[in-house]
Image (cartoon, helix red, strand yellow):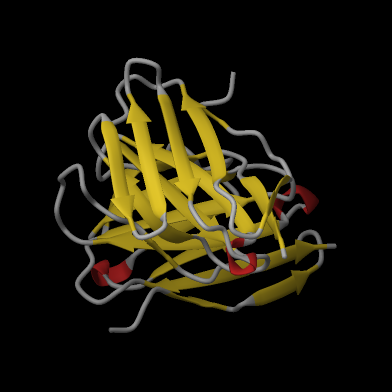
Amino acid sequence: QKEVEQNSGPLSVPEGAIASLNCTYSDRGSQSFFWYRQYSGKSPELIMSIYSNGDKEDGRFTAQLNKASQYVSLLIRDSQPSDSATYLCAVSRGYQKVTFGIGTKLQVIP
Amino acid sequence: EAGVTQFPSHSVIEKGQTVTLRCDPISGHDNLYWYRRVMGKEIKFLLHFVKESKQDESGMPNNRFLAERTGGTYSTLKVQPAELEDSGVYFCASSPQGRGLQETQYFGPGTRLLVL
């Protein structure tokens, strides 16, 4: 079992739709949860972090965390073609190493 | 504020040669991390420095890899001798000196290593 599980996609959504990205993790000691966006050939860029159960909203992005289910999700509202990228789910126990999922490739179709 | 920088951006070497990668963290960041992404796989942790000390090197694949962080500033990762399976993208990340939960790691652009 992988430590962080994501569907590698691609996930295709039409422009303006909501994109829903999901991941599960195995380490119950995880306390910090991240979504990174990575464009092809570029470095991961942090877009959302969440540390407690519930929802966290930042602009068009909403991260959701359910520690009991060991589940993290990212919703992107009003998806734009510029959102097309690979989205990496990542977890850590704080300032320690970050464990990444394989990433979900998102394609927003104009 | 300058971000994390890495040098070189690309390196192509032959099997058996030595390569040294360099990472300059964000100024003032005590935590420095090395990660590697092999094609088709997840980004994997290699090691973590706190200042000049190795905090966690559990991800280092074998003794052909040597990481240093002289004076707690920049870090180097040397691969000697390089093997074909060492090919991938090597990322460096840094975070501030805190040890709290909400430590964000900022990633550098990566070094793309190809071993032929």
- Which residue shows up at 59% across the image and 58% down it? A16
- Which residue shows up at 49% across the image and 42% down it? A89
Question: Is B70 above or below relative to A108?
Answer: below
Quadrant of the image for the N terminus of chain B? bottom left
Q: Residue furthest bottom?
A: B1
Left or right of A98 on screen, residue B12: right
Quarter of image, res B18? bottom right
- Which residue shows up at 67% across the image and 65% down it? A40
Measured as percent of width and height from the top left, residue A76 is found at 49, 51
Q: Residue furthest front?
A: A16
Question: Is A78 above or below relative to A21?
Answer: below
Measured as percent of width and height from the top left, residue B41 is found at 68, 42
Quarter of image, res A28? top left
Residue B79 can be seen in this image: no
Residue A61 can be seen in this image: yes
- Which residue shows up at 74% across the image and 50% down it? B39
Quadrant of the image for the C terminus of chain B? bottom right
Quarter of image, res A93? top left
Which sits in the foreground, A89 or A65?
A: A65
Measured as percent of width and height from the top left, residue A49 is found at 32, 48
Measured as percent of width and height from the top left, residue A107 is found at 70, 55
Which sits in the foreground, A107 or B57?
A: A107
Q: Residue furthest right?
A: B116
Which sits in the foreground, B31 or B57?
A: B31
Counting every numbered tag in the picture gives: 0
Question: Is A4 above or below relative to B6?
Answer: above
Which sits in the foreground, A31 or B53?
A: A31
